[in-house]
């Protein structure tokens, strides 16, 4: 229920009480304050009255109208008051999405209302909240300043059909901010010193943003040519939103001769390069919003045309801009930002939390526990039964969350992380972690490898649902699956070694192919014991090497050329080296291996058994003796290593690819068994 005294409080505080900033509120995102103790002793805040968890009560912030400043006191400070409402009453409010930042304190920006005199606005670090001076991060202060300035304009132009910069106003959806709109801001509407309250409010974050009338995404101050870039995006969307890719390409061809096009495109790159898009908390805030207004300084753009434009930007650049030698939208460097913006356009509520955690694993947050908590509002099983609890450490949060996610999604793709063996962090977190090998350490932002599958989903076990149990204090994951084989010999691939005297050569491929024994022991089959020819073996090796969508897209070397180079007597010729180096550039930090198949079930038909050697691809930290298994509910084969401290148990190494066994060929060939993963 809304505060009945809100109107009188607004009247009393409209000038703000200019008291000294003796009280402060930590203003990180909702939970980051919990990651470390404050360096200064924070006074108890008496402006926060208890919330009622049973009615899903929240606080809302009311920004007070700006009053004329004075020579003595200076500009009118930002003043706000709080009120209480229940989400069960379906209140009308806006919400702010922003990133925590404190690098701009003491800096200034140009006052848009006094450009002629080049007046500057000094960025402050505090506001007045219910009459008390409280600290805020500079980025939040700037966001509040811009919201208040926009509200001032609408107060002066109440009947306007367009905004200050000519933008159309949707008065039914109310995507513009006015003084009549209360707004939810985590740093000010949550008592950050109350851990119990913070747990409860963070649990509601998904609903808070999903139920807001409009979410304001504050990305930061303007970049050059923002206005022209916004006009370009909105114009293209209004003309081409239902068009096919060919029509988009045609339209951009018309735009290319315009000298302003490149500057607008570069501006779009700068907007997408803002640190805001790389923060994990903003993902669900941006995706879940019913209506979302993106702020770039004074200019705003609706998230729908922005997401639509960015959705097509990469394809447009690949087809057209690079042909002209202009690579300005650096899609590789901007991948996390592009994923966030595109997700607004592509998000599907049926997506699993496992997939969401993987897509946004590179996004940053100051508290490692928020790698889970920051995305709980997404996915087909809201919250997944995961309870926000900032009294737990990151390891406990990860282990409990992964177990809950596995239990609901019945999908083991989340467990096949190679990060603990290939982390490139300067100071690895993994050495300090006590996590089992089947629990991904989400703290690692620098995983060395992409998926060996290139994003392709397989079903090697023939089962789409995982069958598992968790035992021994939640440390052991017992999974059902099939033992497919054991790695015999490994050939690490590294493009930098091609031309070194002791590095990888074309002949190494031929040696691996020729030396590999048959995958099936001759005593277990009636197949001829004679080995297949070298070209036939190289075909199998080539299939293992190129069983990847990334490779198919670039087509570095076809099968015939590969076999020719490997069987040619002149294996040191430069053209052959160049071809192999181009191929290995796609396969850096991967390895090829030959496989000895596990014992097939009795009575299996010889026709189902491979006649020659079997080759696969894995990560280079795998080694001879590691086993390859097909776990139920896992979209790829998995490499396991015997746990030296727990006989009969295994450590998870990561995914592997064996072309002959990626699509259910192992079903009925090998016996089902349990694998205890530690």
Image (cartoon, helix red, strand yellow):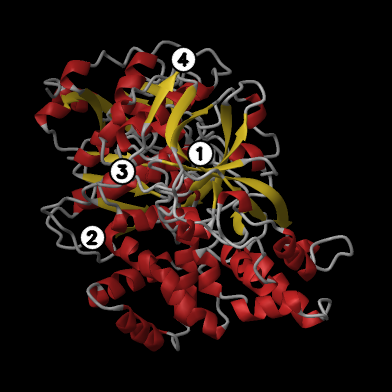
Q: Which mark is residue 163?
A: 2
Q: Is residue 664 visible?
A: yes
Q: Please determine whether, in this image, residue 63 is positioned above or below residue 432.
A: below
Question: Disc 1, disc 2: CB below 8 Å?
Answer: no
Drawn side of residue 620 relative to residue 105, left or right: right
Q: Residues within 10 Å of mark 4 (few under 14, many from 20)?
A: few
Left or right relative to 295: residue 594: right
SS class, disc 4: loop
Q: Which residue is mark 1?
A: 101
Mark 4 and mark 1: Cα distance apart in space: 40 Å
Label 2 secondary element: loop
The disc label shown at residue 473, or none: 4
Q: What residue appears at the point 74 percent right and 77 percent down from the top-left corner?
A: 567
Residue at the spot of label 3? 148
Point out the tag, 1 or 2, that comes first from the N-terminus.
Answer: 1
- The answer to which of 208 and 467 lies nearer the viewer is 467
The answer to whether the residue labelled 1 contacts the one labelled 3, judged by CB atoms less than 8 Å apart, is: no
- Numbered disc in front, either 4 or 1: 4
Q: Position of residue 568 (x, y in %)?
A: 77, 80
Disc ID at residue 462: none
Q: Is residue 668 rendered to the left or right of residue 321?
A: left
Residue 315 lies, in percent from the top left, at: 42, 73
What is the total number of numbered labels drawn onto the structure image?
4
Real-space Cα distance between discs 4 and 3? Answer: 53 Å
Identify the element where label 1 is drawn. loop
């Amino acid at each position: 229920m809304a505060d009945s005294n809100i109107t009188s409080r607004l009247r009393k505080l409209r000038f703000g009480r200019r008291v000294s900033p003796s009280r402060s509120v930590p203003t990180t995102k909702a939970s980051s304050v919990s990651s470390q103790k404050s360096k200064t002793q924070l006074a108890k805040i008496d402006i926060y009255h208890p919330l009622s968890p049973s009615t899903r009560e929240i606080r809302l912030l009311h920004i007070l109208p700006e009053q004329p400043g004075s020579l003595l006191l200076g500009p009118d400070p930002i003043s706000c008051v709080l009120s209480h409402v229940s989400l069960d009453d379906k209140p009308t409010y806006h919400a702010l999405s922003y990133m925590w930042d404190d690098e701009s304190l003491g800096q200034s920006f140009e006052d848009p209302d006094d450009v002629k005199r080049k007046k500057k606005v000094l960025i402050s670090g505090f506001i007045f909240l219910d009459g008390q001076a409280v600290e805020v991060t500079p980025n939040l202060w700037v966001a509040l300043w811009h919201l208040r300035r926009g509200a001032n304009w609408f107060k002066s132009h109440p009947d306007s059909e367009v905004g200050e910069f000519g933008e159309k106003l949707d008065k039914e959806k109310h995507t513009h901010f006015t003084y009549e709109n209360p707004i939810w801001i985590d740093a000010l509407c949550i008592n950050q010193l109350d851990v119990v309250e913070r747990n409860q409010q963070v649990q509601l974050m998904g609903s808070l943003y999903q139920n807001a009338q409009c979410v304001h995404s504050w990305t930061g101050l303007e970049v050059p040519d923002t206005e022209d870039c916004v006009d370009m995006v909105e114009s293209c969307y209004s003309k081409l939103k239902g068009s096919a890719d060919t029509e988009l390409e045609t339209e951009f061809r018309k735009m290319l001769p315009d000298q302003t096009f490149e500057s607008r495109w570069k501006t779009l790159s700068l907007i997408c390069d803002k640190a805001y898009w790389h923060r994990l908390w903003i993902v669900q805030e941006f995706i879940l919003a019913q209506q979302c207004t993106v702020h770039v300084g004074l200019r705003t753009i609706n998230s729908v045309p922005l997401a639509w434009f960015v959705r097509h930007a990469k394809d447009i650049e690949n087809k057209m801009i690079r042909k002209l030698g202009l690579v300005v939208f650096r899609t590789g460097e901007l991948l996390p930002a592009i994923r966030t913006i595109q997700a607004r356009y592509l998000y599907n509520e049926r997506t699993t939390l496992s997939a969401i955690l993987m897509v946004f694993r590179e996004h940053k947050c100051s508290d490692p526990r928020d790698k889970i908590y920051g995305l709980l509002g997404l996915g087909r099983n809201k919250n997944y039964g995961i309870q926000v609890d900032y009294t737990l450490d990151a390891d406990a949060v990860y282990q409990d969350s992964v177990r809950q996610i596995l239990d609901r999604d019945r999908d083991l793709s989340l467990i096949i992380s190679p990060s603990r063996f290939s982390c490139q962090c300067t100071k690895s977190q993994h050495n300090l972690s006590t996590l089992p090998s089947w629990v991904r350490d989400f703290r690692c932002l620098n995983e060395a490898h992409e998926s060996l599958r290139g994003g392709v989903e397989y079903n090697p076990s023939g089962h789409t649902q995982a069958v598992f149990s968790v035992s021994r204090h939640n440390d052991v994951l017992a999974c059902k699956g099939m033992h497919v084989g054991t790695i015999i010999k490994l050939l690490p691939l590294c493009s930098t070694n091609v031309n070194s005297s002791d590095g990888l050569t074309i002949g190494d491929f031929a040696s691996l192919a020729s030396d590999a024994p048959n995958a099936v022991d001759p005593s277990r089959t009636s197949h001829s014991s004679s080995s297949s020819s070298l070209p036939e073996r190289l075909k199998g090796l080539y299939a293992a090497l190129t069983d990847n969508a990334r490779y198919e897209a670039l087509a570095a070397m076809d099968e015939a050329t590969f076999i020719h180079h490997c069987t040619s007597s002149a294996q040191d010729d430069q053209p052959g080296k160049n071809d192999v180096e181009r191929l290995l550039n796609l396969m850096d930090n991967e390895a090829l291996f030959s496989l000895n198949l596990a014992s097939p079930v009795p009575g299996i038909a010889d026709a189902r058994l491979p006649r020659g050697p079997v080759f696969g691809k894995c990560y280079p930290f795998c080694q001879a003796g590691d086993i390859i298994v097909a776990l139920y509910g896992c979209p790829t084969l998995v490499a396991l290593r015997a746990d030296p401290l727990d006989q009969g148990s295994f450590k998870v190494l990561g995914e592997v690819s064996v072309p002959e066994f990626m699509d259910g060929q192992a079903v009925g060939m090998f016996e089902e068994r349990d694998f205890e993963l530690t």
